[in-house]
Image (cartoon, rainbow, N blue to C red):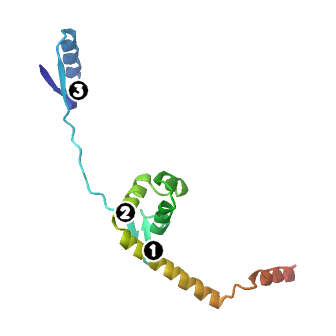
Amino acid sequence: MRIIRTSDLYSPQSYRLIGRLLLYGLEISLVMSMTLSIALEPAPIETDDYGVVRVSRTRVTLDTVVTAFLEGCTPEEIGEQYPSLQLSDIYLVIGYYLRHRDEVHTYLAERQHQADMIQQEVEQRFNPIGIRDRLLARRDQSR
């Protein structure tokens, strides 16, 4: 029995040898000699100057990807909604979330608290009650 490695299959000599062996009805055994390099990929997330975690140097936030995932979107659907993200990065971010749920939920709660505080501050400075009427009156004055 002749052993031929799969890494040798694509050489012209191998094609001739395999042809001769088959011609004479001899048994051919293939030995798989593939190598797979396994590398640890870090999550493609970065914290910007304002403390917001963004995905892959894009403007898409961790909040956005995790919320979409929790709402039932598949990584492919998230990729369709945010074409600036690569599908592999979306999978890595979801994997990061699944491994660090408590930390991510703490971060998301903190972000929500900050958003609520900013909204309260804006509403105190610019009263939203009656804003439509004020804008319509301003428009009518300019006509």
Q: Position of residue 66 (x, y in %)?
A: 46, 64
Residue farthest to the left, as pictured = 1
Residue occupying image coordinates x 21% and y 41%: 35
Q: Quadrant of residue 136?
A: bottom right
For label 3, count other residues whose C-alpha is less than 10 Å away and answer few (under 14), some (14-19) or many (20+). Answer: some
Q: Quadrant of residue 27?
A: top left
Seen in the picture, residue 111 relative to 12 is either above or below; the reply is below
Q: Position of residue 50 (x, y in %)?
A: 45, 78
Who comes first in sequence, dot 1 or dot 3?
Answer: 3
The Cα atoms of the two marked residues, 2 and 3, are separated by 41 Å
The Cα atoms of the two marked residues, 1 and 2, are separated by 14 Å
Q: Position of residue 90 (x, y in %)?
A: 43, 57
For label 1, count other residues whose C-alpha is less than 10 Å away and answer few (under 14), some (14-19) or many (20+). Answer: some
| Quarter of the figure that contains the C terminus | bottom right
In the rendered image, which residue does mark 1 sit on? 108
What's the amino acid at mark 2?
Leu
| Quarter of the figure that contains the N terminus | top left
Pair 2/3: label in front: 2
Who comes first in sequence, dot 1 or dot 2?
Answer: 2
Disc ID at residue 10: none
Seen in the picture, residue 139 relative to 94 is either above or below; the reply is below
Q: Position of residue 77 (x, y in %)?
A: 52, 53
What's the amino acid at mark 3?
Leu
Question: Helix or strand or loop: what does disc 1 sit on?
Answer: helix
Residue occupying image coordinates x 21% and y 18%: 18
What's the amino acid at mark 1?
Leu
Asked whether residue 48 is in view, the answer is: no
- 130 vs 53, left or right, is right
Q: Quadrant of residue 41?
A: bottom left
In the rendered image, which residue does mark 2 sit on? 98
Disc ID at residue 9: 3
Residue farthest to the bottom, as pictured = 124
